[in-house]
């Protein structure tokens, strides 16, 4: 069979076409969803900030430890927001119409950043949150009886341990497996773009 | 160029290239549609720096490459045999089905390159779409065609 025959054979295959208007409708719908998502994320961030600042002003903590605790929690949240936000321009910049080799490199970069966010940043975030909350609680625990204070700390410690060792470790591990699998595949495909030896 | 014109001129071509990459009718249609969603969104910012065809094929192939993320979530092999068989897939000419199957056995980049070549795109343009040298494209096309011819030799004999 000659090369022309391959072309004829290939080009004889057609799909049932959808109406282009349906594509346009889909595109518009997707745009609306993206816009709504961006607005929702911004509202949530704003409310979180208001809530934290509100707590500081409302309770008027007297001890330095409480203030440091609050600060650590805020730093944790802000750090997480910044790290996540740094991914957004990357995804947006990855132009859908760059050549395939560059697009692959860009995808690989994003996935690696995601992997970093998923492990290092998440660990740090949790650590800051944990230490921050324990420091913050101290002032209020002092006002309780000893047994209540121990109970109060025990419950919190239990909750942190549960969410850390069970919920978050498991989720992270699962996500990490997926991201690593994608990275591995991307790297394999990338090598195909290297020059033939 | 208007969106409708581009759509009419390129839908089948894009569908075939996607089909060459995933070898699944519905999946290929989805990728082709997503490609035109991006074309519609970005048509206003398209500045004719490259040919319309180069632009569209790049978007389509990039979309194919992105299927990697979805592939992990939706392993095709996990579908029970009966469902896969009863799915309303248009009857393919055996020979075309065999061609798709042969292409599907190639590596990702080879699948892309041969699909573009079979769409009658010049090798220089394929190089621009994919982002490798023209010489490299030429070598690859030569090797892939040898492989396909070899496989079809056995097919034609049976």
Image: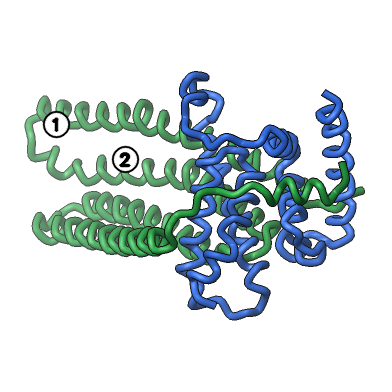
Chain colours: A green, B blue
Q: Is residue A44 above or below residue B78?
A: below
Q: Is residue A116 above or below residue A21?
A: above
Q: Is residue A55 above or below residue A181?
A: below
Residue under mark 1: which chain is it in? Answer: A
Residue at mark 2: A130
Q: Is residue B17 left or right of residue A46?
A: right
**What residue lies at 53% left-to-right and 44% top-to-bottom?**
A115
- As helix, strand or loop, the secondary structure at mark 2 comes to helix
Residue at mark 1: A149
Query: Where does the image place residue B138, in percent across and percent down from the top left?
Result: 88, 56
Residue B42 visible to an observer of this rendering: no
Q: Is residue A162 left or right of residue A138?
A: right
**What residue lies at 69% left-to-right and 39% top-to-bottom?**
B96
Between A182 and B50, the one nearer to me in the picture: B50
Between A120 and B39, the one nearer to me in the picture: B39
Mark in the foreground, 1 or 2:
2
Q: Is residue A64 above or below residue A160?
A: below
Q: Count all numbered tags in the image, as a single digit.
A: 2
Which quarter of the rendered picture does the N terminus of chain B lie within?
Answer: bottom right
Between A168 and B1, the one nearer to me in the picture: B1
Give the crowd class for mark 1: few <14, some 14-19, many >=20 residues within 10 Å. some
Give the alpha-carbon distance from disc 1 to disc 2, as whole Å: 17 Å
- As helix, strand or loop, the secondary structure at mark 1 comes to helix
Q: Return the disc, 1 or 2, that comes first in the chain's sequence.
A: 2
């Amino acid at each position: 069979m000659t090369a022309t025959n391959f072309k004829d054979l290939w080009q004889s295959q057609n799909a049932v076409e959808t109406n282009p208007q349906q594509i346009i409708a889909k595109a518009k719908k997707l745009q609306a969803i993206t816009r709504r998502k961006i607005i929702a994320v911004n509202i949530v961030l704003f409310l979180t900030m208001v809530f934290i600042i509100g707590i500081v002003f409302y309770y008027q903590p007297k001890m330095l430890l409480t203030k440091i605790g609050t600060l650590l929690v805020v730093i944790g949240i802000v750090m997480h927001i910044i790290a996540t936000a740094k991914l957004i321009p990357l995804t947006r910049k990855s132009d859908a119409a760059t050549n395939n080799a560059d697009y692959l490199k860009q995808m690989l970069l994003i996935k690696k950043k995601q992997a970093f966010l998923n492990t290092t940043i998440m660990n740090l975030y949790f650590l800051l949150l944990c230490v921050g909350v324990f420091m913050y609680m101290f002032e209020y625990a002092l006002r309780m009886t000893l047994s209540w204070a121990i109970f109060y700390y025990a419950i919190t410690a239990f909750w942190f341990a549960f969410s850390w060792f069970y919920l978050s470790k498991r989720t992270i591990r699962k996500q990490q497996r997926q991201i690593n699998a994608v990275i591995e595949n991307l790297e394999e495909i990338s090598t195909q773009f290297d020059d033939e030896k | 160029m208007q969106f409708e014109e581009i759509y009419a001129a390129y839908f089948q071509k894009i569908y075939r290239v996607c089909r060459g990459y995933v070898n699944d009718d519905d999946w290929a249609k989805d990728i082709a549609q997503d490609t035109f969603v991006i074309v519609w969104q970005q048509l206003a910012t398209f500045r004719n720096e490259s040919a319309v065809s180069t632009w569209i094929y790049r978007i389509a192939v990039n979309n194919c490459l992105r299927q990697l993320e979805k592939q992990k979530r939706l392993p095709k092999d996990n579908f029970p045999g009966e469902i896969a068989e009863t799915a309303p897939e248009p009857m393919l000419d055996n020979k075309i089905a065999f061609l798709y199957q042969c292409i599907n056995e190639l590596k990702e980049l080879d699948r892309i390159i041969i699909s573009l070549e079979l769409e009658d795109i010049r090798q220089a343009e394929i190089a621009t779409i994919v982002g490798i040298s023209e010489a490299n494209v030429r070598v690859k096309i030569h090797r892939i065609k040898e492989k396909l011819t070899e496989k079809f030799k056995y097919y034609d004999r049976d």
